[in-house]
């Protein structure tokens, strides 16, 4: 499974994004989450990385889509009322102690979910098409609370 995590981290590297460990070092940042999505071999969607940065009074979600010529970025300012239910649910599900989903098909859609706070870092690899139990609930948490993180690249921003 760690091979999946390493391969998925390369996506954010190629998009020129800072690591989450660097993100948490920025002044005023309390916590950061990252969702890296590599779509399946039969998908027309490009890889994307969503980073949720938690500041003292606000949260910012930036989604970066891989495009042929340059990265496409979409930034969303989220009120803390949107962030708190997401974080609460992820912790209720035991995200910080959860192991990677077993038996992931390497050609399917794969997510790398990371959380960093102070000197803490945890990551989890899941594949939504084959997720069950707590792994499926983690996927549902993103779908319910942070749909922007998994939404397709905006139509107007598509490149040929």
Image: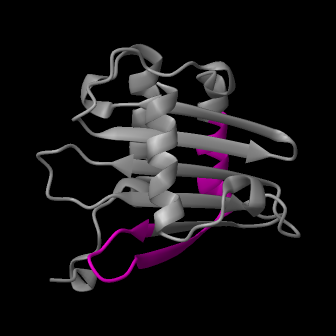
> How many numbered callouts?
0
Q: Residue at x 44, y 43 (%)?
A: 7
Q: Please state the horizontal and vertical placement of residue 144, each as a whole percent of the image.
A: 42, 44
Q: Does the magenta portion include 87? A: yes
Identify the image quadrant of the C terminus. Answer: bottom left
Q: Is residue 145 visible?
A: no
Given residues 119 and 52, the one toward you in this image is: 119
- Among the 4 quarters of the image, the one containing residue 126: top left
Q: Residue at x 63, y 21 (%)?
A: 94
Relative side of 120 to 104, left or right:
right
Relative side of 51 to 14, left or right:
right
Q: Please state the horizontal and vertical placement of residue 61, each as a whole percent of the image.
A: 56, 65
Residue extending farthest to the left is 42
On screen, 17 above or below 9? below
- Among the 4 quarters of the image, the one containing residue 114: top right
Q: How is the image coloured?
A: one colour
Q: Residue at x 83, y 68 (%)?
A: 26
Q: Is residue 113 visible?
A: yes
Q: Please state the horizontal and vertical placement of residue 76, each as a whole percent of the image.
A: 53, 72
- Please state the extent of the stretch shown in magenta in the rendering: 64-88
Q: Does the magenta portion include 138? A: no
On screen, 127 above or below 28? above
Q: Residue at x 46, y 50 (%)?
A: 36
Q: Please state the horizontal and vertical placement of residue 47, each as a whole percent of the image.
A: 33, 58
């Amino acid at each position: 499974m760690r091979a999946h995590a390493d391969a998925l981290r390369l996506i954010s590297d190629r998009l020129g994004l800072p690591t989450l460990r660097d993100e948490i070092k920025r002044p005023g940042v309390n916590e950061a989450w990252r969702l890296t999505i590599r779509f399946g071999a039969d998908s027309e969607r490009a890889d994307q990385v969503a980073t949720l940065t938690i500041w003292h009074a606000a949260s910012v979600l930036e989604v970066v889509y891989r495009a042929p010529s340059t990265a496409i970025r979409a930034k969303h300012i989220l009120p803390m009322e949107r962030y708190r239910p997401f974080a609460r649910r992820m912790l209720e599900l035991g995200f910080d102690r959860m192991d990677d989903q077993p038996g992931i098909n390497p050609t399917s859609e794969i997510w790398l979910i990371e959380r960093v706070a102070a000197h803490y870092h945890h990551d989890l690899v899941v594949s939504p098409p084959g997720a069950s139990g707590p792994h499926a609930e983690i996927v549902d948490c993103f779908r319910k609370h942070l749909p922007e993180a998994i939404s397709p690249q905006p139509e107007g921003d598509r490149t040929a």
